[in-house]
Image (tube, coloured by chain):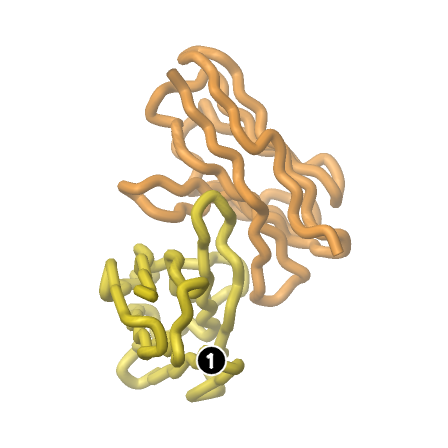
Amino acid sequence: DAGVIQSPRHEVTEMGQEVTLRCKPISGHNSLFWYRQTMMRGLELLIYFNNNVPIDDSGMPEDRFSAKMPNASFSTLKIQPSEPRDSAVYFCASSPGGDTQYFGPGTRLTVL
Amino acid sequence: GENVEQHPSTLSVQEGDSAVIKCTYSDSASNYFPWYKQELGKGPQLIIDIRSNVGEKKDQRIAVTLNKTAKHFSLHITETQPEDSAVYFCAASNTGNQFYFGTGTSLTVIP
């Protein structure tokens, strides 16, 4: 079975540019999570969706970050404009409901 | 909110020895405790989990124990192998959605 798919795997951009990260959850899973991982702050939950509806976005650092889930098989995390402090690995995870979350391989973002 | 503390931050063991990683949590309402293994350049992978109605769970060389009274849980890896080298994260949850992660333990198994 295909796991959570994320693209791109690596992204290098310049400060001020728009960045879009993409995620395809595991088929049949109804919850989707976006995390950010840094050495300083560890794994942080940014936002999660249940049945395509955003439930809690309190972890989104600021208005420059936005996330959408237009359908059950696709989600995006957008940063506009990007800043060097946004450099991190961004993970998407999905869950079939209940507890267990399955993580994707991550997108390593570098903002110069 | 929930606060999860994880110790140690680094751990080195000889191949064949056991490794133990401990986590404490603060919210007595937490009822689900997964453990994730993260290898370099990869996403966290669930290796074992335990729910609050169980005190211990085992899967081959991996076991997790939970003490709800003391609010702590531990990961035990026996007969360690070099491929067990990775970063391990504990987490606690009381809603099934919001995971609170520990800060991670970098385990090195020395051949």
- Relative to A25, residue B75 above or below: below
Which chain is painted in orange? Answer: A
- Relative to B11, residue B28 above or below: below
- Relative to A56, residue B74 above or below: below
Q: Quadrant of the C terminus of chain A?
A: top left
| Residue depicted at x 36% and y 77% | B16
Q: Is residue B57 something that shows in the picture?
A: yes
Q: Is residue B78 left or right of residue B4?
A: right
Which chain is painted in yellow? Answer: B
| Residue depicted at x 24% and y 66% | B7
Q: Secondary structure at mark 1?
A: loop
Q: Is residue B64 left or right of residue A105?
A: left
Residue B8, position as x, y percentages in the image: 23, 64
Total marks in image? 1
| Residue depicted at x 56% and y 33% | A9
- Relative to B47, residue A107 above or below: above
Q: Residues within 10 Å of mark 1 (few under 14, many from 20)?
A: few
Q: Quadrant of the N terminus of chain A?
A: bottom right
Q: Report in which chain the residue with disc 1 lies.
A: B
Residue B49, position as x, y percentages in the image: 50, 73
User: Tag 1: residue type?
Assistant: Arg
Q: Which residue is mark 1?
A: B61
Give the residue at the far front of this rendering. Answer: B111
